[in-house]
Image (cartoon, helix red, strand yellow):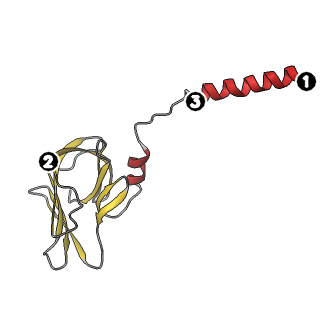
Amino acid sequence: MKIVNYILVLAILGGAVLLSGCKKDNGMNVTSYMFEKKTVPGIYQDAKAYYSLKNETDQLYFNSATNTFRIVSDTGDRYFEVVMDEPIGNVGKVIKLSVHNHGLDSSIPTLEGVDFEIKKKEGNFCWLWNQSSAIGIIVFYVK
C-alpha cells in the first residue's frame, strides 16, 4: 500500500511539474482581450475607462481629411481628440497617433506619435491598442 501511495504522489508531482512548464500564447494578453470587449468609444488603460462617450452630454466627431476623431461635449468647450497619421487600415496594421484633451480630466494621457495596432473593426468603429502602455482607444471613423 505504501508503494502505491508513493507512486501516486510521484505521479501527481510529475504532472504538476509538466503542467507548470506549459504556456499558451495566442498573441493576446488579458488586458487587450478585456479592452476588445468594450463597446463605448473612448480611451482605456488596463481595460478601465479614462474617458468614454456619455450619450447624454457628448457627441462623436470625425474628420476624414485630417484623420481626427473627437468626443466633444454638447457645448463644444470640452473634448478628447485622437489624430491619426493615416486613415484606418486593416486589422493588424500599426498606425501612429496623438492624443489630446481639452477641458477634461487631467489624468487622460497626452500621447504624441505613439504606435497603436488596429485590433478590431466593426461598422464605423475601430479598436486601437498600444501594448507597452496597455492603452486602448475605440474611435468612430467614416470610411
Q: Which residue is mark 1?
A: 1
Q: Residue furthest right?
A: 1
Q: Position of residue 10 (x, y in %)?
A: 74, 22
Relative side of 7 to 31, left or right: right
Circle 1 residues within 10 Å: few <14, some 14–19, many ≥20: few
Relative side of 48 to 104, left or right: right
Q: CA distance from mark 3 to mark 2?
A: 44 Å
Which residue lies at the image location 40% right of the left edge and 37% below the top edge? Answer: 27
110 vs 103: above or below: above
Q: Position of residue 25 (x, y in %)?
A: 45, 34
Badge 3 or badge 2: first in the primary sequence: 3
Q: In what quadrant of the picture does the N terminus appear?
A: top right
Circle 3 residues within 10 Å: few <14, some 14–19, many ≥20: few
Q: Which residue is mark 2?
A: 86
Which residue lies at the image location 17% right of the left edge and 68% below the top edge? Answer: 79
Badge 3 or badge 1: first in the primary sequence: 1
Q: Is 114 or 39 nearer to us in this picture?
A: 114
Q: CA distance from mark 3 to mark 1?
A: 29 Å
Secondary structure, mark 1, is loop
Q: Is residue 96 visible?
A: yes
Circle 2 residues within 10 Å: few <14, some 14–19, many ≥20: some
Q: Is residue 127 visible?
A: no
Comparing marks 2 and 1, which lies closer to the viewer?
Answer: 1
16 vs 87: above or below: above
Q: In what quadrant of the picture does the C terminus appear?
A: bottom left
Comparing marks 3 and 1, which lies closer to the viewer?
Answer: 1
Q: Which residue is mark 3?
A: 20
Secondary structure, mark 2, is loop
Q: CA distance from mark 2 to mark 1?
A: 72 Å
The amino acid at mark 1 is Met
